[in-house]
Image (spheres, grey):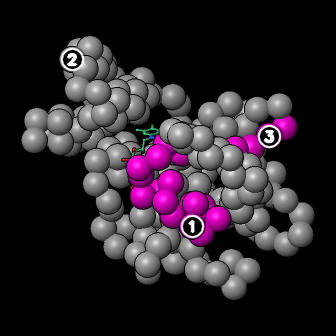
Amino acid sequence: MTGSKQPDLDGFGIYEGISETIVTTMHDCSPNAAPIGIIRKGGRIFTRLFKGSNTYYNVHSEGYLVANVINDPVIFVRSTFSNLEESDFNFESVSGREFPVLKDALSWVVFECNNMKISHEALVAELLPIHAHINRSPVQAPNRGFNAVIEAAVHATRYQLSHDEKYLKLIHEYSAIVSKCGGEREKNAINILNEFLAK
Ligand SMILES: Cc1cc2nc3c(=O)[nH]c(=O)nc-3n(C[C@H](O)[C@H](O)[C@H](O)COP(=O)(O)O)c2cc1C
């Protein structure tokens, strides 16, 4: 959908609270993907990007991002530790600009990033949805294994920054939940995560 009316984000899977999405951005003709939280609170939609990431740099220079809603745990882990392959992306034209989106996204929303506030550690941008699209809306019960992969990936990014062993202990605990409750995709994702950490 598009037009002057803003998309209703509930209909595209982005609800009140923090939605863990894969944000895709473009810079120098190459697409980038990273897990990023889209925050909806009290009528505001915004994101907080920590300094140093490609996403921070791309949003700062381009002023747009695409939030992809996705239920593939492997994509979450791969995009946390490395970039995805070119073949993981499609390119979509919106208002005369080309945006990278994930082929496997359930839905994606293009946001204009406004009123950027920059502190010494992060950038906070207000997000204005300008276009949204749904590919699929599967019926799916919550899976603790999937949630545990997301928690483990968050702790892995903290471990990479601090090298604090407490994060390895937490990742170990979440890995046990993945073995108990996850499907093949979740087990594959947690193995990839542990391989990245062992490097
Ligand atoms: C579930 C999840 C949510 C995340 N949310 C954010 C976020 O809201 N803001 C942020 O700056 N980093 C966030 N991160 C960390 C970035 O995804 C991570 O630093 C990533 O490597 C950045 O990749 P890039 O350099 O390609 O942008 C999150 C990581 C995970 C696993």
136 inside magenta stretch: no
Residue under label 2: 165
Q: Is residue 187 above or below residue 82?
A: above
Q: Which residue is mark 3?
A: 44
Badge number at residue 61: 1
The amino acid on which the numbered mark 2 sits, given as a three-letter code, is Glu
Location of ligand 1 given as a quarter of the image: top left
Residue at the image point whose x is 68% and y is 46% from the top = 117
* Crowd around label 1: few <14 · some 14–19 · many ≥20 (10 Å): few
Vertical placement of 53 versus 58: above or below?
Answer: above
Q: Earlier in the sequence, mark 1 or mark 3?
A: 3
Quadrant assignment, res 165 = top left
Q: CA distance from mark 1 to mark 3?
A: 22 Å
Marks 1 and 2, the one that precedes in the sequence: 1
Residue drawn at 27 percent across, 35 percent down? 160
Say what amino acid the circle numbered 1 marks: Ser
- Write the start and end of the magenta stretch as one range: 43-65
Q: Residues within 10 Å of mark 2 (few under 14, many from 20)?
A: few
Task: Classify 53 as above or below 152.
Answer: below
Badge 1 element: helix
- Secondary structure, mark 3, is strand
Choose mark 1 or mark 2, whichever is in front. Answer: 1
**Residue 45 sits inside the magenta stretch:** yes
